[in-house]
Image: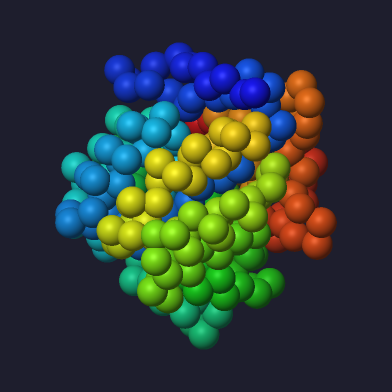
Amino acid sequence: MLVPVLAVAVNGTPAQAAPDRVAGYVGLTFDDGPDPDTTGALLSALQSAGARATFFNIGRRAQANPSLVRAQQAAGMWTGNHSWTHAHLTQLSPAQMSSELSQTQQAVQQAIGTAPRLLRPPYGETNATLREVASQFGLTEVLWSVDSQDWNGASTAQIVQAASNLQAGGVILMHDGYRTTIDAIPQIVADLTSRGLCPGMICAATGRAVAPDGTTTPPPGGGTSPPPGGGTSTFSAPATTCRTA
């Protein structure tokens, strides 16, 4: 039986609760914030569950709600770039792509002092041009291995069921904006714990989920490879360690 243990506190709040035998790490990700109506409740749910996650923020919302971006950071979360306007980036010119990404980089940096290193392209739409533009900002593109379908009206039970398909190294797509998603957090984390999986950070070198301290060394009893046939990034740069910024 796996017995959860508390990790070191982050900014005065409990860090990730981990089982005694970790089989691997997964990436919990939330797009489209920050949202004044839901971000606070989402952060509270994650903290109560002892989980950390990556928030892919829309730039104009980050600019309008810098205190919420700071709240994400203070809660031990990581922050990514989700474009300035949630645009269909592959339909834009390289210059327009650059503007979408650069404005978001600036908004997040103004809020928390550091710019994102991860990009979640809206709708998962990407191509070689976008990846080249993203690389100019030092951004690693991160897609997902599991879609929660919360954006498509999935119930809390359906979101929890989708998350049960997460495997070590995998990343789940969720959104900041749905009560159903917030309500799913305790059950998602409980299921992960029962399977020896812990929410971790997404490595900026590989786009894959790794331990919260950034290490990619496989933990006792398992590793962090993505599920067969899947992956979480179009980048494949190898890394033996991956430290948080």
Q: Which residue appears at 37% of the width and 56% of the height?
A: 181
Q: Which residue appears at 57% of the width and 75% of the height?
A: 125
- Quarter of the picture containing the N terminus is top right
Q: Which residue appears at 65% of the width and 59% of the height?
A: 145
Tell me which corner region of the image, top left, top right, bottom left or bottom right, holds residue 153: bottom left
Tell me which corner region of the image, top left, top right, bottom left or bottom right, holds residue 99: bottom left
Does residue 169 appear left or right of residue 109 in this picture? right
Rendering coords of residue 89 (x, y %): 49, 76
Residue 22, compared with residue 173, is above or below; it is above
Total marks shown come to 0
Front in this rendered view, residue 242 or 11 = 11
Residue 171, compared with residue 100, is above or below; it is above
Tell me which corner region of the image, top left, top right, bottom left or bottom right, holds residue 241: top right
Rendering coords of residue 51 (x, y %): 44, 34
Does residue 163 appear left or right of residue 48 in this picture? right
Residue 106, compared with residue 90, is above or below; it is above
Rendering coords of residue 194 (x, y %): 60, 34
